[in-house]
Image (cartoon, rainbow, N blue to C red):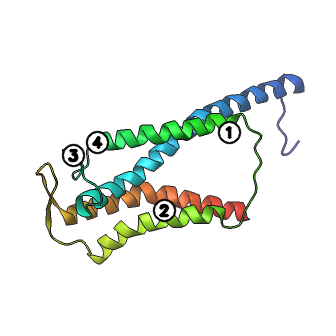
Amino acid sequence: MHGEVECPIGPDECSGRSGRVLDAVADLLWFATPVIASFIMVSWDLTIDPRMSTIGGSWLWHNGGSYFGVPLSNFLGWYLTVYVFFQCFALYTRRQFATYTKMPGYWATALFAYTSIIIAPILSLLLGAESASTLTDPAGHMWQAQDIGSVTALLCLFTALPFWLLAVFEIGRDRL
């Protein structure tokens, strides 16, 4: 019996239980995947927003915020927005017959885009590219550009990079 599992209550009862367990896991994943994916998206936003808004001026928060000029409501709003999209997509795909086609380079494109998001703050920190300037947000708060760069690089290393590595390993596993 090496490699087999004995079911002490009989094969019919055992298969019924395993079916219910698999259904329960599928139901949990249907809800948990959008929740986790939304946290992943906010981890990217934590590394991007202070650099793009407070340092780069790509957009403005007129009332500023406590996270280097970005309001905390931005991250909650981002989380809820992507959660709604992910959950709607999960509801839609739950009712669809799934087929999986391995198209060469399909996941590599997204990985390349996220790679650039990860590399920028880390390289900037390592190369000392952030100026020693003091920035003032529209609310009048003063921030040090080097502090923003250091914090976003650290956040990138410990939040975004692990998710990126999981994706790289998953792509590598799929190719084996």
Residue at left offset 51%, top offset 42%: 36
- The residue under label 1 is 93
- Residue 72's label in the rendered image is 4
- Judged from the image, the secondary structure of the residue bearing numbered disc 1 is helix
- Judged from the image, the secondary structure of the residue bearing numbered disc 4 is helix
Q: CA gap, disc 4 to disc 3?
A: 7 Å
At label 4, counting other C-alpha atoms closer than 10 Å, the crowd grade (few under 14, some 14-19, many 20 or more) is few
Left-right relation of 85 to 170: left
Residue at left offset 10%, top offset 51%: 140
- The residue under label 2 is 114
Contact, mark 2 vs mark 3 (Cβ under 8 Å): no
As shown in the figure, which amino acid type bears the numbered disc 1? Thr
> Residue 17 location, x and y as percent?
77, 25
At label 2, counting other C-alpha atoms closer than 10 Å, the crowd grade (few under 14, some 14-19, many 20 or more) is some
Q: CA gap, disc 4 to disc 2?
A: 23 Å
Left-right relation of 175 to 118: right
- The residue under label 3 is 65
- Judged from the image, the secondary structure of the residue bearing numbered disc 2 is helix
Query: In this view of the protein, can residue 8 be seen by the observer?
Result: no
Q: Earlier in the sequence, mark 1 or mark 3?
A: 3
Judge whether 19 appears above or below 116 on screen: above
Nearest the camera: 54 or 128?
Answer: 54
> Residue 154 location, x and y as percent?
33, 60
* Marks 2, 1: nearer the viewer: 1
